[in-house]
């Protein structure tokens, strides 16, 4: 590219940004003047350039990127990196954006808002250093106003992820979440300055409190009027309050407005009804700022004896833990992809999500509000001392100890406070967690009790006197809990404990409102007896039947949070594995057999499912089983049945192999020993003698064609772009999936569209995630394609060998 071409390209980008910033203010926005700031960034990975002066003067090889952007997932996978973070690289990344602002006004306020930058981010505007944020999972914002000008602004962002083995799971690298520019008047609602609560709710009336913090940057006191209203889903105002306020010079004022809503429609997991909260600020009769968002009216409580109640009704939390990545997309996952994933969880019967082990993307909480998921939001995986980070493979070799702990003393309380401020208006969130497995025995904290008793999770043998004392757990927890309650007392504060035996000898559990137990089901009954006022719940659990029975058979236990919903990058076994297979759904979003076992426990809709094992002892390895009826004639197969009906009858090529009562126990899954014969294997489920559910497996033939289904997500509210998700299958002439003849699939695009990634679900594939082709895994492949806002006549060509399909969008 010639220098003149580069100059012209940059000029076009600047003009586009100027037009975009001006024209999109207020459109789709929840805050006045809030615009997406994701386009026309430039990126360079320069591990040896550590200062702004060096970056501004020395970097020549910039490439254009659109945010969100995760450079680690661009790879390549290599055994030289760490298993904990998926054998993917880290380094130092520099981002630069040159922009102008149409109708620039020096008397206005301009704020840059980052939803997350991993990690140790630093930001400069026009050469002025705005600040540093070590935590890579938290949102933060800076005031640009003192340094901004009408044109030629240069914004630089540095992300320092040289400590690539700094986590027990995949983090991603760079500006991997949305960025927004917010333009407001000098008198304006503060970022995170609105707090909506429902302190009293009955069937006839809901009391509403709305706390609003308004900033005044003017050097004189300013009178303003504040109006708050609540609208139902039809746009009817159901509650409103207006008041006068005075803003002190160069300071802020916080007001609380209260009103009541008659006959409230309550938010629940089955009917997640949302109202629209609107706040407007007036000066001299003119509207100068507004804020609006969806909110829900609900009440909930945890009880030490009876578990969890939502809107007065006792219910079980059927939860899953999730990480923020999605295979090929790394940590930069579009909203439409997460919506598809959450839809799969709804099919499962899931009603709760644990955001492990850090705050997640902003829109994920919106989706939980809209779709009816209860949420535990979590802050940290380590505090003041680093945990073990596996380099060679999970629990293999010598671990490293890089991490986030070195910033905890300075930033820990602000980090947890900012997590709460950012998300506290979401009705889905029912608890704040200040830490995950901080008390993992000997990793790093220790206590003499580790020389006795039962400690199922422990690093090393017994008490390690040279390790940090476990007494610190209660001290630090108390400080973090206070930081949370300084900004929200409407939700309980919790943590997920791994070493309950040890923590019971400290002040840690007592510092918490409710106490999460990770894989400690065997302690439920004993600890409930010893600590009858302690609210105990399952915060992270395995998939065994016994783990679920520990919930259903103990009325004081309210939940199970299954580890995990989805396979995820990182926490890998030794190379060549590079991802965790802990999920009941694979990296591409396809359910595994264990998904249907869980569905039979959690979902009341009649269902039946078959999974096949070649050895009887493998029947319990549900995540490892497949629903494929294939083999050699005469082979012995063990057919496991997952169902929530009374009886299931198995048929092979029209011949009944018998009926079995569906009773789950620890001795084995209900099922049949079958001599393999090609054809149709069919299960029929019965209730009261009536057929209510069926499931069939057919022996596949050779690959005949590409079976493709597509889902196009809603256009993004800010950018207008859409995400298309293609499910590509190798199919025989009868439409059956062919799982054992994997082959390369190529994607070609015609029109204004971009291939974001191809994901097969293969945990050991080292193929380039940036490539336009990938090998199927067990006959399937997922493609993620972004279609630009103004695009028309976009064609997607899918090819594999002599097979080809063309789809238009």
Image (spheres, grey):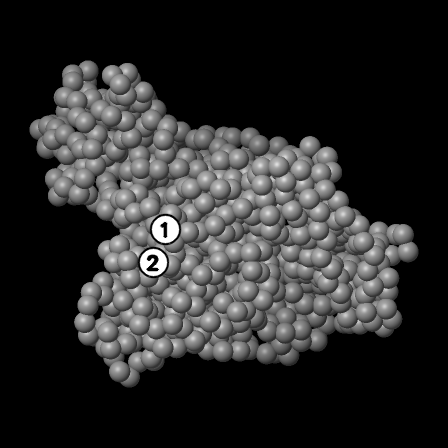
Q: Residues within 10 Å of mark 1 (few under 14, many from 20)?
A: some
Label 2's element? Answer: loop
Which residue in the structure is indicated by mark 1?
A: 305
Figure disc tally: 2
Which residue is rendered at x = 31% and y = 20% of the image? 692
Return the x and y of residue 685 as percentages of the image width and height. Answer: 26, 23
Residue on which disc 2 sits: 532
Residue at 41% over, 62% down: 495
Q: Nearer the viewer, residue 794 or 453?
A: 453
x and y percent of residue 421 in the render?
Answer: 60, 61
The Cα atoms of the two marked residues, 2 and 1, are separated by: 8 Å
Residue 47: % across, % down: 50, 73
Q: Are marks 2 and 1 in contact (CB under 8 Å)?
A: yes
Which residue occupies the extreme bottom position in the image? 466
Identify the mark nearer the N-term, 2 or 1.
1
Q: Quadrant of the N terminus?
A: bottom right
């Amino acid at each position: 590219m010639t220098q003149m071409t580069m100059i012209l390209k940059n000029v076009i980008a600047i003009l586009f940004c100027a037009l975009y910033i001006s024209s999109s203010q207020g459109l789709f926005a929840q805050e006045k003047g809030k615009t997406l700031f994701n386009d026309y960034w430039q990126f360079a990975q320069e591990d040896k350039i550590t200062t702004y002066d060096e970056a501004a003067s020395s970097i020549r090889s910039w490439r254009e990127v659109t945010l969100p952007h995760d450079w680690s997932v661009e790879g390549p996978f290599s055994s030289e990196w760490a298993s904990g973070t998926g054998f993917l690289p880290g380094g130092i990344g520099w981002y630069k954006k040159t922009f102008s602002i149409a109708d620039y006004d020096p008397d206005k306020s301009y704020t840059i808002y980052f939803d997350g930058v991993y990690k140790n981010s630093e930001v400069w505007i026009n050469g002025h250093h705005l600040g540093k944020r070590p935590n890579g999972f938290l949102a933060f914002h800076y005031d640009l106003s003192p340094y901004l000008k009408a044109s030629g602004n240069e914004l630089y962002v540095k992300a320092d992820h040289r400590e690539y083995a700094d986590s027990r799971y995949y983090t991603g690298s760079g500006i991997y979440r949305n960025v927004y520019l917010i333009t407001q008047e000098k008198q304006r609602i503060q970022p995170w300055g609105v707090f909506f609560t429902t302190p009293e709710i009955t069937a006839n009336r809901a009391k509403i409190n709305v706390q609003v913090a308004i900033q005044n940057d003017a050097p004189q006191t300013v009178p303003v009027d504040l109006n708050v209203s609540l609208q139902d889903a039809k746009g009817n105002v159901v509650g409103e309050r207006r008041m006068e306020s005075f803003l002190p010079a160069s300071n802020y004022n916080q007001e609380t407005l209260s009103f009541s809503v008659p006959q409230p429609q309550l938010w629940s997991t089955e009917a997640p009804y949302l109202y629209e909260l609107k706040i407007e600020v007036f000066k001299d009769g003119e509207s100068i700022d507004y804020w609006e968002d969806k909110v829900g009216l609900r009440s909930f409580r945890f009880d030490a004896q009876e578990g969890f109640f939502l809107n007065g009704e006792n219910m079980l939390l059927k939860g899953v833990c999730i990480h923020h990545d999605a295979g090929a997309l790394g940590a930069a996952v579009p909203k439409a992809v997460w919506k598809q994933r959450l839809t799969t969880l709804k099919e499962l019967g899931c009603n709760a999500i644990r955001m492990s082990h850090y705050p997640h993307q902003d829109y994920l909480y919106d989706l939980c509000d809209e779709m009816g998921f209860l949420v535990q939001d979590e802050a940290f995986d380590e505090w003041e001392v680093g945990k073990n980070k596996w380099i060679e493979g999970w629990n293999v070799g010598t671990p490293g100890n890089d991490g986030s702990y070195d910033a905890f003393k300075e930033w820990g309380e602000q980090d947890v406070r900012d997590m709460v401020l950012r998300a506290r208006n979401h009705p889905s969130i029912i608890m704040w967690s200040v830490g995950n497995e901080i008390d993992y025995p000997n990793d790093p904290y220790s206590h003499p009790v580790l020389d006795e008793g039962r400690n199922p999770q422990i690093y090393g043998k017994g008490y390690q006197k040279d390790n940090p004392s476990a007494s610190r757990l209660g001290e630090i927890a108390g400080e973090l809990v206070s930081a949370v309650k300084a900004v929200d007392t409407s939700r309980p504060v919790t943590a997920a404990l791994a070493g309950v035996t040890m923590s019971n000898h400290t002040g840690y559990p007592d510092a918490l409102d409710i106490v999460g137990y990770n894989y400690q089901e065997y302690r439920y009954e004993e600890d409930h007896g010893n600590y009858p006022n302690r609210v105990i719940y399952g915060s992270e659990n395995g998939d065994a039947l016994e783990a679920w029975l520990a919930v259903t058979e103990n009325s004081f236990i309210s939940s199970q949070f299954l580890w995990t919903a989805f396979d995820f990058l990182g926490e890998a076994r030794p190379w060549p594995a590079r991802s965790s297979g802990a999920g009941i759904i694979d990296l591409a979003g396809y359910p595994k057999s264990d998904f249907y076992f869980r569905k039979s426990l959690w979902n009341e809709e009649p269902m039946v499912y078959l999974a096949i094992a070649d050895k009887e002892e493998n029947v319990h390895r549900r995540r490892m089983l497949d629903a494929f009826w294939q083999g050699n004639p005469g082979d012995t197969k063990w057919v496991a049945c997952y169902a929530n009906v009374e009886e299931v009858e198995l048929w092979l090529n029209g011949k009944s192999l018998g009926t079995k009562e569906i009773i789950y126990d620890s001795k084995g899954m209900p099922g049949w020993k079958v001599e393999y014969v090609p054809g149709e294997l069919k299960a029929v489920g019965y209730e009261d003698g009536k057929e209510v559910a069926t499931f069939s497996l057919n022996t596949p033939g050779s690959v005949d064609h590409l079976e493709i289904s597509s889902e196009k997500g809603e256009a993004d509210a800010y950018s207008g772009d859409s995400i298309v998700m293609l499910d590509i299958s190798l199919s025989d002439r009868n439409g059956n999936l062919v799982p054992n003849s994997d082959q390369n699939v190529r994607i070609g695009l015609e029109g204004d569209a971009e291939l974001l990634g191809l994901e097969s679900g293969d945990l050991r594939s080292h193929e380039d995630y940036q490539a336009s082709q990938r090998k199927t895994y067990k006959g399937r492949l997922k493609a993620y394609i972004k279609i630009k806002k103004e695009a028309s006549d976009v064609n997607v060509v899918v090819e594999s060998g002599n097979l080809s399909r063309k789809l238009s969008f």
